Image (cartoon, coloured by chain):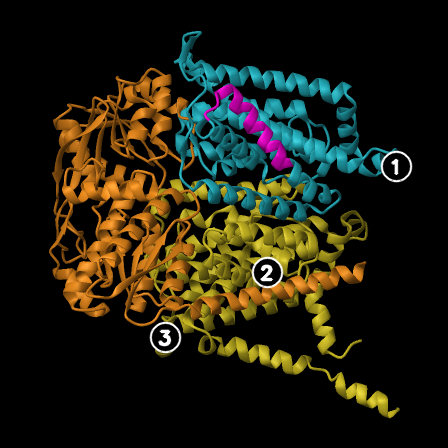
Chain colours: A cyan, B yellow, C orange
């Protein structure tokens, strides 16, 4: 009994890591743009497709396919960032909802048009099961955990010390002041957006071997998982997002075990609503910023 | 008055009244002008116009961006469907019950949700839709789960000797048209009332409105409930027209559809919503000819809307209206 | 600046509006001359079931091409129209309306999802257009057809009830399983298959230990598989999506369930792609399918070969049933002596159609009597264990 609970918590942490890498990009984009990015999961999908293409069509190794997946997503994100996201500085919330939904539809259906609507089979990665602390776990899942930790340490350092990170924080606090002191707001927006998209793509490529299937609609699901996380974590809050993702991952895992798998996708929003009643500003903020 | 002035006046005659008359005639004669498929598309437009009207009161007049409309739409659809299937009640009973139930659900949901700030509120309302779908899927003894309710009877009016059933597409169109017109009139009356002015005050500046003595909290809750009632009645039409309700009635796609109608037509205008529902349905049906490119084109249209029509089509319509009205 | 912007807006709006108005008109102009048989296909071409829609379309296309290349049905060519249902009832109804009213088709084949087909039934009935279903398995569709009400609905596909019975019987009697765990898709199909399994399981002394349903697109089964492992179930009753089977199988390997717990049910366990994803997990799996590529009949083999060379991909069940149903319709039109809906409907009720899986006839509920093919994965290959046809017990009206 007890070991089952521990095992489920481990499962939850692995799932939470996947969500965390995607959600942190989304929350940073929110920080600088004040827009909920409904298309964020699509970059997860693009990354996975890029890697799948590299393995299946180009015959590259899995390691190389990670680079192909992330790089191809960066190119798409650059185009979308220049054409759409940069224009959204200061736009009202509803414009953000519609524009990102539009992008999601275009990206998702373009991929379906090019590669077909069917599921693709992702071969590659380290799927051999390992025994860790008595639990059987694919090596790939441990890789996901490690990468997630590295990403968050890196982001913390970047946000605190680098020039880019500082200007990101500045933009998320006050756009007008940034313009006054000479911070190039559109450039910060573009860079943040590309970084966020690249992280989502990385998460997708890392998850592909254990999730096996690759298909055009996969991004939408991950978008819906990450939306409650970024609110719970406190919008724009990197550290809060990490903990919120872990909480959601573990909660989902426990619900799937003890309540039923059919309720799993509801966990995120149910937790969010309950939490908002208790703490309307998110778990990790003391006051409302957005 | 010089001759030239008179000539100009003749040229710029006010054409608004004739145009309005033509529009009314077209609306009434539509089933006989277009094919049955056109009538069907118009019915879909009228069905979605109802929740869009409600959403417009929220987004356009009170300034609250909500994605919960599909949840109330679904509640209404299930309420009407269940009543019709199990008790065979007449349509006006089902529609009323659907509206009231949706409104009643909006009260406990609105109280916690409306305490939230902008983005959290949007996500919370989206959560209602997702949880609504889970309930519809898993409360099998009532909703029949994923199978949905099927064979919902055609709308029936029990008026003693004058009882009748709305069976064909054409008659359903007239019923939906009548309900749509009533709903439009209701929105117009709400907006014109003192309450409507208070709503606009909240949209423009909530703090200022509050300091002027507008009970902002009570108004926001009231508008949230009214918008749910509109969605619920729309849901009852949906259930009776399609004769099927499934958990997929609760989906974000419908919420965004309603949002697109409002923002595309012009938030905060009534004619904009009417026009928006026609445009939206016209567009999705027109895009049916290219199934592969349909959703891509639709996504691009959204981007066009956001960047070139920031206020929807309402300004374009207004300009046209003024132009035919003889304004310079 | 402001002025030009709004003028641009005006231009774009006019363009969009005129597009919206003229485009349906244009498609109306493209109507073919008389002397063709217009057939509409409603299938999910987008959305979560898009894969099934793509296979369905290709199957139908192939059959139409074969028939037309052979000179058509008594000289009349079949013209194929398609419409996207997105797997949702409202879109399905819109799609059906469009096919009937704009494309003026005489026959509609569709949809894959049962809930969509249920919504299409009254539309076809109103328009007196033949609705031939080829891939929805919910029994309610034909409970309400034929003498049950909808005279224009026919189904050329076996039902969930038949499938659930065959699987439960084989798993219990031949394999000796008594403890089952449910892991099926959370849809009308997965839920109703389990509902019927529960009806028959007590007859075979079987019990269900855990019950879970996954949503389309679910990728993480570790939690639920660990629960199943701990429950001591011998077999997993899985009525699932083809695309999810490899994910479950892989994670069964990951958790050490492969070889200990057997998959039984339906979800394309038998395709090469699925088996290769996790051979150890699928060994011994039991599946009941309407058809499978390995089915041993010359027509079936020829179909697989032709499909594979045409589309560079092996056909699945949905491709086959749509291919088969188009051929069934063609024979009905031939026997009716022409393209007359009413006569074709009568011909269909009396038809004796030789399909690759056996002779097809329709009962008074317009339900085809079709076998369920039972197979088991042995040494990484599907082995056919028999084909079972059951008469359906209709609930009293």
Camera-side residue of C53 and B271: C53
Q: CA distance from mark 2 to mark 3?
A: 30 Å
Tell me the quarter of the image containing the C terminus of chain B. Answer: bottom right
Residue A91 is left or right of residue A222, and the answer is: right
The magenta segment: A59-77
Camera-side residue of B65 and A162: A162
Residue appearing at x 35%, y 28% in the figure: C246
Residue appearing at x 48%, y 17% in the figure: A141
Q: CA distance from mark 2 to mark 1?
A: 42 Å
Q: Main secondary structure of the magenta part?
A: helix
Instruction: Give the labeled residue for mark 2.
Output: B53
**Discs 1 and 3 carry the same chain letter:** no
Residue A3 is left or right of residue A164, and the answer is: left
Q: Chain of mark 3?
A: B
Can you give x and y, in whole percent of width and height, for residue A158 in the image? 72, 20
Instruction: Give the labeled residue for mark 3.
Output: B163
Camera-side residue of A72 and B99: A72
Pair 1/3: label in front: 1
Q: Specify few, some or many for label 1: CA neighbours under 10 Å numbering under 14, 14-19, or 20 or more.
A: few
Q: CA distance from mark 1 to mark 3?
A: 71 Å
Residue B213 is left or right of residue B74, and the answer is: right
Q: Chain of mark 2?
A: B
Pair 2/3: label in front: 2
Instruction: Give the labeled residue for mark 1.
Output: A180
**Discs 2 and 3 carry the same chain letter:** yes
């Amino acid at each position: 009994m007890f070991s089952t609970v521990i095992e489920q918590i481990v499962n939850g942490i692995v799932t939470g890591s996947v969500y965390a890498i995607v959600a942190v990009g989304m929350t940073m984009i929110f920080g600088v743009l004040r827009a909920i990015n409904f298309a964020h999961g699509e970059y997860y999908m693009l990354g996975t497709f890029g890697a799948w293409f590299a393995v299946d069509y180009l015959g590259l190794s899995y390691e190389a396919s990670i680079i192909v997946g992330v790089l191809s997503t960066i190119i798409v994100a650059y185009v979308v960032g220049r054409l759409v996201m940069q224009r959204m500085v200061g736009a009202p919330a509803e414009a953000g909802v519609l524009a990102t939904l539009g992008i999601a539809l275009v990206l998702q259906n373009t991929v379906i048009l090019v590669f077909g609507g069917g599921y693709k089979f992702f071969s590659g990665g380290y799927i051999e099961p390992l025994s860790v602390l008595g639990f059987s776990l694919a090596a790939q899942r441990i890789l996901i955990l490690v990468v997630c930790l590295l990403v968050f340490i890196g982001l913390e350092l970047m946000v605190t010390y680098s020039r880019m990170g500082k200007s990101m924080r500045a933009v998320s606090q006050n756009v007008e002041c940034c313009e006054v002191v000479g911070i190039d707001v559109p450039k910060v927006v573009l860079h943040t957006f590309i970084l966020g998209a690249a992280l989502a793509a990385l998460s997708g490529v890392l998850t592909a071997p254990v999730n096996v299937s690759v298909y055009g609609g996969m991004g939408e699901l991950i978008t819906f998982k990450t939306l409650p996380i970024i609110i719970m974590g406190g919008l724009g809050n990197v550290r809060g997002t990490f903990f919120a993702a872990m909480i959601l991952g573990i909660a989902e895992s426990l619900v799937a075990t003890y309540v039923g798998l059919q309720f799993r996708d509801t966990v995120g929003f149910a937790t969010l609503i309950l939490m908002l009643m208790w703490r309307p500003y998110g778990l990790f903020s003391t006051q409302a910023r957005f | 008055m010089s001759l030239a002035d008179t000539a100009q006046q003749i040229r710029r005659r006010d054409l608004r009244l004739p145009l309005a008359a033509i529009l009314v005639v077209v609306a009434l004669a539509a089933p006989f002008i277009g094919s049955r498929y056109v009538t069907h598309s118009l019915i879909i437009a009228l069905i979605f116009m109802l929740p869009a009207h409600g959403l417009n009161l929220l987004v356009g007049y009170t300034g609250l961006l909500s994605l919960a409309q599909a949840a109330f739409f679904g509640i209404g659809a299930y309420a009407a469907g269940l009543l019709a299937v199990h008790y065979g009640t007449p349509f006006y009973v089902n529609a009323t019950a659907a509206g009231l139930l949706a409104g009643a659900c909006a009260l406990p949901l609105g109280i916690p949700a409306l305490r939230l700030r902008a983005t959290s509120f949007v996500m919370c309302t989206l959560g209602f839709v997702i949880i609504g779908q889970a309930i519809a899927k898993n409360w099998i003894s009532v909703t029949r789960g994923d199978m949905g309710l099927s064979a919902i009877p055609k709308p029936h009016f029990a008026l003693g000797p004058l009882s009748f059933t709305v069976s064909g597409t054409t008659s359903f169109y007239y019923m939906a048209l009548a309900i749509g017109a009533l709903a439009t009139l209701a929105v117009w009356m709400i907006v014109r009332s003192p309450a409507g002015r208070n709503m606009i005050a909240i949209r423009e500046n909530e703090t200022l409105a509050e300091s002027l003595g507008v009970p902002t909290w009570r108004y926001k809750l009231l508008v949230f409930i009214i918008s749910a009632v509109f969605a619920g009645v729309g849901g009852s039409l949906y259930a009776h027209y399609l004769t099927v309700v499934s958990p997929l009635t609760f989906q974000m796609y419908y919420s965004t559809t309603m949002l697109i109608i409002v923002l595309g037509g012009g938030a905060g205008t009534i004619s904009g919503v009417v026009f928006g529902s026609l445009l939206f349905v016209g567009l999705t049906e027109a895009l049916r000819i290219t199934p592969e490119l349909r959703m891509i084109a639709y996504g691009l249209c959204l981007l066009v809307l956001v960047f070139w029509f920031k206020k929807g089509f309402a300004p374009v319509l207004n300009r046209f209206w003024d132009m035919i009205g003889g304004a310079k | 600046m402001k002025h030009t912007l709004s003028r641009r807006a005006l231009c774009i709006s006019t363009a969009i509006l005129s597009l919206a108005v003229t485009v349906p008109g244009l498609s109306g102009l493209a109507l073919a001359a008389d002397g063709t048989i217009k057939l509409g296909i409603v299938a999910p071409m987008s959305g979560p079931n898009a894969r099934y829609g793509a296979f369905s379309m290709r199957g139908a296309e192939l059959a139409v091409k074969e028939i037309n290349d052979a000179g058509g049905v008594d000289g009349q060519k079949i013209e194929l129209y398609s419409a996207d249902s997105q797997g949702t009832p409202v879109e399905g109804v819109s799609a059906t309306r469009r096919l009937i009213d704009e494309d003026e088709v005489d026959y509609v084949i569709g949809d894959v999802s049962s809930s969509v087909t249920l919504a299409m039934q009254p539309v076809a009935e109103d328009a007196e257009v033949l609705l031939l279903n080829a891939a929805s398995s919910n029994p309610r569709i034909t409970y309400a057809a034929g003498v049950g009400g909808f005279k224009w609905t026919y189904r050329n596909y076996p039902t969930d009830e038949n499938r659930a019975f065959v699987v439960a019987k084989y798993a219990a009697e031949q394999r000796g399983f008594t403890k089952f765990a449910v892991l099926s898709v959370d849809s009308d199909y997965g839920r109703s298959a389990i509902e019927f399994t529960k009806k028959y399981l007590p007859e075979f002394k079987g019990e269900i230990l855990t019950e879970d349903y996954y949503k389309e697109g679910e990728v993480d089964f570790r939690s639920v598989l660990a629960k199943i492992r701990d429950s001591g179930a011998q077999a997993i009753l899985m009525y699932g999506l083809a695309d999810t089977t490899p994910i479950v199988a892989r994670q069964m390997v990951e958790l050490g369930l492969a070889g200990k717990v057997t998959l039984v049910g339906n979800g394309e366990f038998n395709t090469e792609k699925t088996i290769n994803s996790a051979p150890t997990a699928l060994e011994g799996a039991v599946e009941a399918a309407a058809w499978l590529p390995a089915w041993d009949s010359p027509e079936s083999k020829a179909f697989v070969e032709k499909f594979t060379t045409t589309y560079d991909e092996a056909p699945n069940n949905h491709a086959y049933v749509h291919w088969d149903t188009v051929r069934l319709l063609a024979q009905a039109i031939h026997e009716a002596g022409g393209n007359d809906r009413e006569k074709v409907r009568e011909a269909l009720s009396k038809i004796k159609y030789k399909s690759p899986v056996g002779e097809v006839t329709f009962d008074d509920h317009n339900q085809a009597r079709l076998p369920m093919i039972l197979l088991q994965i042995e040494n990484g290959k599907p082995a056919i264990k028999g084909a079972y046809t059951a008469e359906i017990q209709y609930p009293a009206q």
